[in-house]
Image (spheres, helix red, strand yellow):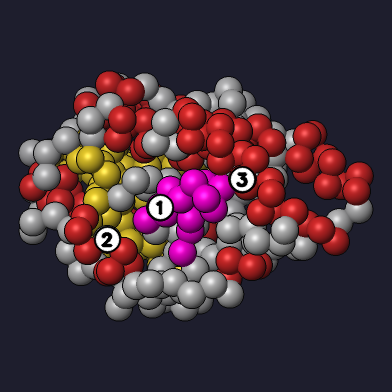
């Protein structure tokens, strides 16, 4: 029987974590077994004790308190490999799983060898709205283009190949993790997924989204206008905090590692800065107003045989 080990880093969000584990407990597991590992990085809201009380079968690893997302995920991947799994499912703890999500991920992975499989991410508050799925590299936009106006009806209905899988819910063959190693926790403390699946792709692994495997995610917290912040705060977010989404380190190493090649990764940086100065940042409010073709058209030629 196949073995799937689920891993997730956790810091507080006790109720989200318990809700996630309850949804995983309802999963259909035909032909495989599941084990779950949580890396609790110093939660102060009782997350660890609550998990142990309600889910004694879940392994809880104590973090050092400064792991952030990337190192926390890496500690989970390391622990998972010691259990000799066939697959490792890396997830975010603020997710609710359809009962057949993991089943469909595993079936897709078994049907398409040497593939890493991502789920269709949807939002809690608008459950038909697609969230952070299938970003596409566009150099003239300064990096990966994310989609903001896609729904369950505008994506391909069969598995399709992509360039990057966002780390909210990714089924990695254990062989892929052993082959490429772990996420880059030294340079990308909080955004290790930005370069991880592109690195696997360059190593010969195909990246697929299985749109029938569905996960409901907490929407991102509303952003606050960067331009309206005091100059000192802007400087801090760019140069003083490597975990900030505005960090130069995140932008540089995410671009270098996630781009098709290092030249494009380098070229994307000045293009991004220019677009930012012009108010046409692909990750800002401008992008929300731009028309988007349906992903079923964007990825029409990338659909794989089912």
Q: Quadrant of the C terminus?
A: bottom left
User: Measured from the top left, where is residue 76 in percent x and y?
Assistant: 42, 32
* Residue visible at 44% across and 37% down in the picture: 259
Q: Nearer the viewer, residue 85 or 277?
A: 277
Measured in 3D between alpha carbons, the distance from the residue under mark 2 to the one under mark 1, in whole angstroms, is 10 Å
Up/down of 9 relative to 284, above or below: above
Q: Is residue 39 visible?
A: no
User: Measured from the top left, where is residue 52 in percent x and y?
Assistant: 46, 44
Q: Which residues are magenta?
A: 134-147
* Residue visible at 86% across and 56% down in the picture: 229
Please say whether residue 136 is one of the residues in the magenta stretch.
yes
Mark 1 highlights which residue? 136
Q: Report whether 134 appears left or right of 284.
A: left
Q: Nearer the viewer, residue 65 or 283?
A: 283
Mark 2 highlights which residue? 299
Specify which label sits upstream in the sequence, 2 or 1.
Answer: 1
Dot label at residue 271: 3
Q: Report whether 149 appears left or right of 158.
A: right
Specify which label sits upstream in the sequence, 3 or 1.
Answer: 1
Find residue 74 and report its image quarter: top left
């Amino acid at each position: 029987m196949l073995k799937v080990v689920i891993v997730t880093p956790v810091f507080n969000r006790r109720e989200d974590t318990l809700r996630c584990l309850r949804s995983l407990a309802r999963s259909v597991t035909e032909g495989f077994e599941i084990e779950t590992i949580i890396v609790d990085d110093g939660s102060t809201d009782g997350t660890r004790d609550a998990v142990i009380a309600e889910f004694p079968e879940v392994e809880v690893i104590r973090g050092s308190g400064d792991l952030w997302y990337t190192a926390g995920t890496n500690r989970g991947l390391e622990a998972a490999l010691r259990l000799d799994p066939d697959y490792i499912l890396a997830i975010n703890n603020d997710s609710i799983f359809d009962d057949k999500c993991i089943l469909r991920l595993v079936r897709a992975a078994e049907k398409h060898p040497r593939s890493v499989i991502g789920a269709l991410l949807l939002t809690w508050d608008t459950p038909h709205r697609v969230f952070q799925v299938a970003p596409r590299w566009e150099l003239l936009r300064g990096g990966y283009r994310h989609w903001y106006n896609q729904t369950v009806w505008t994506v391909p209905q069969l598995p399709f190949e992509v360039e990057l899988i966002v780390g909210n819910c990714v089924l990695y063959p254990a062989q892929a993790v052993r082959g490429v190693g772990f996420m880059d926790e030294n340079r990308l403390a909080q955004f290790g997924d930005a370069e991880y699946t592109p690195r696997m792709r360059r190593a010969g692994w195909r990246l697929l989204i299985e749109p029938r495997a569905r996960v409901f995610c907490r929407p991102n917290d509303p952003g606050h206008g960067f331009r309206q912040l005091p100059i000192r705060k802007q400087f801090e977010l760019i140069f003083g905090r490597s975990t900030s989404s505005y960090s130069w380190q995140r932008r540089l190493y995410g671009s270098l590692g996630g781009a098709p090649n290092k030249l494009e990764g380098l070229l994307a940086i000045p293009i991004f800065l220019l677009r930012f100065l012009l108010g046409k940042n692909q990750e800002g409010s401008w992008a929300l107003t731009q028309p988007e073709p349906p992903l079923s058209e964007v990825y029409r030629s990338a659909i794989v045989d089912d």
